[in-house]
Image (cartoon, rainbow, N blue to C red):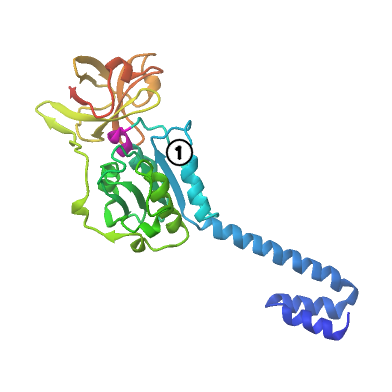
Amino acid sequence: MEKRQLKEVFFSLKGVEKYVFMIFTFHSRKSYCFFLFLVLVVLGCGKKEQREMKNNSKPIIGLITDFSSKDPYVAQMKGVIFSLDPDARVIDLNHEIDPFNLTEAAFIVDQSSREFPPGSIFIAVIDPGVGTDRKAILWESKAHKFYIGPDNGIFSLVMDREGITNVWILDKPEMWKSKEPSSTFHGRDVFSPIAAFLSKGGKPQNVGSKISKDNLHFLSFSPASIIGQNISAQVLYVDHYGNIITNIPWGLAPWIKEGNLVRVQIGKITLAAPCVRTYSELPLGKIGVLYNSSGYLEIASNQGSAAKLFKVQSGASLLIHP
């Protein structure tokens, strides 16, 4: 290789690469081609790693809906997001919420978002009022997570747990998929474009007008309370196994502890239930109560469905008697 060519190659390199180039060049001209090949490989790998690091640094977009996996609606939301941000990191959190069940939705949104890192973005679409004058909102929690969806109460529990920093109403049509969105599918036409905008580094204050958290809609969750010798509570959720998750937090009643026997009353049905630590401590098909991984009192049946025995759904009231 001519001196002029060596000089051009030398000045095209940066940092340590120049010094390594000099060593190989002065040591053996024959080894230069191999060295240059290695340099190009390293630089190519570096660019690939930079792209991967860039993608991994992007926030996660989590989807929560009552759309199920049968219909095309989830796919359409993803299509909009990827069209606007091909490098978006989109994951499915839950699409099997009972249709229009806001109580169940509030529980799922709260529980599903707990373990995600700051900066995460959640789209929640359980929206029986779509197309009406209900507000479409983006809000930021004190945990620096972002939530997008209808202002119908589905964020009640997570707002209470994480706290609210800022709220914006999505009133800028230029940020939507279309200035005239479908009156039946804001998940695709309004919420998804906003998530993609945030994923690309957009500022939340650019998506709409800031509003006070006092103007938000909250579901009427009655906190569990002790009335005389009893606990009055509410069913937050019935899981896939038929376990009944209540809003009774750990420590509310000291007499709910391992080894004690309580009575669970839901509607006209009252059943005795031992307090246990694990499901397997119960005889097969028998009812018991225990504190679950979220710290709530759960009414369960060992390899059976407590919900079927009590004929209960989320939102129902219940009493626990000592």
Q: Is residue 105 left or right of residue 218?
A: right
Residue 105 versus residue 286 in the image, above or below: below
Closer to the camera in the image, 153 or 311: 153
Q: Residue 241: horizontal and vertical position, in percent? A: 39, 23
At numbered mark 1, what does the secondary structure look like: helix, strand or loop? helix
Q: Residue 225: horizontal and vertical position, in percent? A: 15, 33
Name which residue lies at 76% across and 81% down.
Answer: 10
- The quadrant of the image that shows the C terminus is top left
Name which residue lies at 22% across and 40% down.
Answer: 219
Residue 190 versus residue 111 in the image, above or below: below
Q: Residue 52: horizontal and vertical position, in percent? A: 60, 57
Question: In terms of secondary structure, what is the magenta stretch mainly?
Answer: helix
Residue 280 drawn in magenta: no
Closer to the camera in the image, 259 or 247: 247
Query: In this rendering, does residue 114 appear at all?
Result: no
Q: Residue 7: horizontal and vertical position, in percent? A: 79, 84
Closer to the camera in the image, 206 or 231: 206
Name which residue lies at 24% across and 29% down.
Answer: 315
Give the residue number, with chain letter if any, for mark 1.
Answer: 73
Residue range (magenta): 100-107
Q: Is residue 241 left or right of residue 219?
A: right
Residue 105 drawn in magenta: yes
Question: Which residue type does callout 1 highlight?
Answer: Tyr
Residue 314 versus residue 175 in the image, above or below: above
- The quadrant of the image that shows the N terminus is bottom right
Q: Is residue 201 left or right of residue 150?
A: right
Circle 1 residues within 10 Å: few <14, some 14–19, many ≥20: some
